[in-house]
Image (tube, coloured by chain):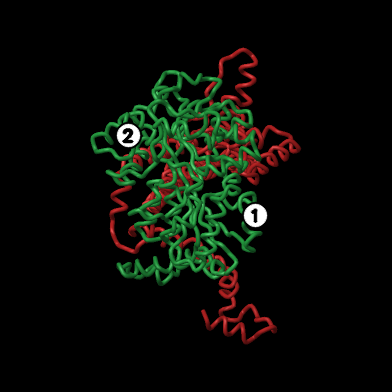
Chain colours: A red, B green
Amino acid sequence: MTDSIHVDGATGSRRAPASRVGSHSFMPVVLGAPVLIWQLVFFAAPLAFLLVVTFWKVASFKLEPAFSFDNWTKVLLSGPYQKALVYTAGTASLATLLTVLVALPAAYTIAFRLSPKLRNLAVTCLIVPVFSSYLLRIYAWQIVLSPEGVINSVFKGLGGAGLSLLGGQLALQIGLLTLTLPVAILVLVLAFSGIDRTLIEAAENLGCRRSKVIVHVLLPSIRNAIVLAASTAFILSFGDYVSPLFMTGSNPPTLSILIVDTVKSGSQWPRASVIGITMLAALILVFVAGQLLTRTGKGAQ
Amino acid sequence: MNVPKFMSRDLSRRGFIKAGLAGAAVAATSKWSLAQAQEPNVLNYLSWPGNADPYLIADFEKEHGVTVRIKEYVGGDQMLAVINQSPPGSFDVVLADAEYMHLLHEADFIEELDPADYPLEDFFPEFQKFPLHWFDDKLYGVMTDFGYLGLSYNTDVYKPEEVQSYAALWAEKAQGKVGFFDWYLPSMGSISLAEGNRPPFDIDSEHFEAVKQKLFSLKPQASGFYTIADIFSSLTNGQTHLVPGIGEWITLGLRLNGVPVDTIIPDEGGLQWTESLSIVKGTPKADLARKFIQYTTSPEGQVKMATKVDNKKSIPSMAGWRLLNETMPTDAEILRLTFDAPNVMDEYKAGKIAFRQLPSQQSIEDWNDVWSEFKSL
């Protein structure tokens, strides 16, 4: 590799002819190296450090290098951790299901039922929230849902009793869907838009009703996009810290909240790292499962 | 695929530690800069947020021609973590909660002080020799301010006589409306008081177990576990009606802004938090640090401490009270720092107040674990 760089360097501004040996691999290396270095420095190295730290000890609030599995056993065997794991996985699964259930019809409507003008507007409306602060959007939901909030004021004005909306799974799912829906719908709209319209025409010409077209033509064609949207929704909601904190007041805590709690009480970075590593492992599992799903999909086609 | 060499290497114990140390070195670059800390006209102040507000320190900076540089921490654990991880000379003066003073002293982080240097005789007699600031009859911290933690409640929902006892927390009326400050110490301390434990933090394993069960029985009542900011919003938007283990440092400001909240010290008692200033061991600027403590405990400094807009506190100095009553009588009344009317010393004199302290018969971790378990029930 250094040879090829040397050769190109020697030819200088004369520009190496395309046939010169090595020049084919030169540009990709030059263009790719920063990305690779970036990944190593800012992703691989911190990740390795995170793993290393899980074996360390904390003595009088200071991290001390050690090689002990105490943190792993302490965390994995603790009741709060196990409960938080089940709760977080359950919450994220529900959020994923809801996201797909809401996003599919929404994306279908945007892609097939709206005029081009309205479609562009809808897509813009989906993109804007992605670039606005998620924290702000959650605070806005707090104002809407709280006992003295917008919904309750209207409801009480109509003579109803106050509703307890904030706190609990309803508020949490509203918060998580705020995060996942725009992304999921965008992914699915793009996928729907990419479908070859002649396939739909052919199905209709052969006498398929719309529902049959959707089930047998549209959904199979965007299978990969559905898996992508679902796994993205799961990853986003599994690791989310903001919604559980502000929509349910950490009651009960998720794994992300447990990480913060672990650090807050006694600077237990090693134990927090254990939780972090297990969360990463769970996400990798979900990602691999998604990959397998898309692969079997390809095989079936 | 090129696997980076260091990843394919056998991860031996030594390799592990080496890799970790390299990472730690990277992490260390974000630390407090020692070079800056050692500039002669800078006072390095380790403190809770907000204590370098110009309202508090501008006069001191002008008088001595120095800059106060604050490193903020949230909570005593974080304070200990920062001071443990910083090289000597990083800080000159530290503001600490009383319950952490013995840890600072045992770890040899703070200097012994000469009582004659400070206006202790101005203080209420109760606070002149505050037990948590003296070790072996030697002074290590000078009290700057204090406050009580009891039961804070929504005054639209509860009359004062309904919240005379912590039992209100378990009442049907409070179901799903009890908010908790997400810190085990004051929250579990209140429950320990409700259990009749005096002092609340020095309890044997049997009583600790009883506190645990009592706490766990509160779970159906819980609306959530809040940070300081969220305590404010959940009391304001009506999500919580009762919060044990907080005090006027939260409810007074809210009430002045029209939120219907107040704090009561229930019959079972309340907790006292206390802040004090100490000189950090090994500082070359002990002289300046001493002057800073003298300034903060002077009548003028005390008045500022009591009336800072975002965090109202009680002050231990009678001279401070006198100046406050002369210059800002309305504030003195609101803060209950007047001599001729019911004032903040009444609860103290009535023996209703226990110090907020670290658990003495169990480890901090034991209490924290119970708190984590409670949250995840």
B207 or B274, which is in the foreground? B274
Q: Is residue A84 visible?
A: yes
- Check disc 1 and give the amino acid type: Ala
Whether residue A46 sits left or right of residue A127 in the image: it is left
Asked whether the residues under marks 1 and 2 belong to the same chain, the reply is yes
* Mark 1 lies on residue: B58
Q: Are marks 1 and 2 in contact (CB under 8 Å)?
A: no
Q: Is residue A186 visible?
A: no
Chain for disc number 1: B
Label 2 sits on a secondary structure element that is loop
Above or below: residue B221 compared with residue B250: above
**x, y percentage for residue A283?**
43, 48
Above or below: residue A140 compared with residue A240: above
The residue depicted at 33 percent of the width and 39 percent of the height is: B201
The residue depicted at 51 percent of the width and 60 percent of the height is: B290
The residue depicted at 27 percent of the width and 43 percent of the height is: B361
Whether residue B278 sits left or right of residue A67 in the image: it is right
| Res A177 quadrant in image | top right
**x, y percentage for residue A224?**
52, 45
- 10 Å crowding of disc 1: few (<14), some (14-19), many (20+): some
- Check disc 2 and give the amino acid type: Arg
B141 or A122, which is in the foreground? B141
Give the residue at the far left of this rendering. B206
| Res B63 quadrant in image | bottom right
A195 or B129, which is in the foreground? B129
Specify the label residue B198 is tagged with: 2
Cα gap from disc 1 to disc 2, whole angstroms:
42 Å
Q: Earlier in the sequence, mark 1 or mark 2?
A: 1
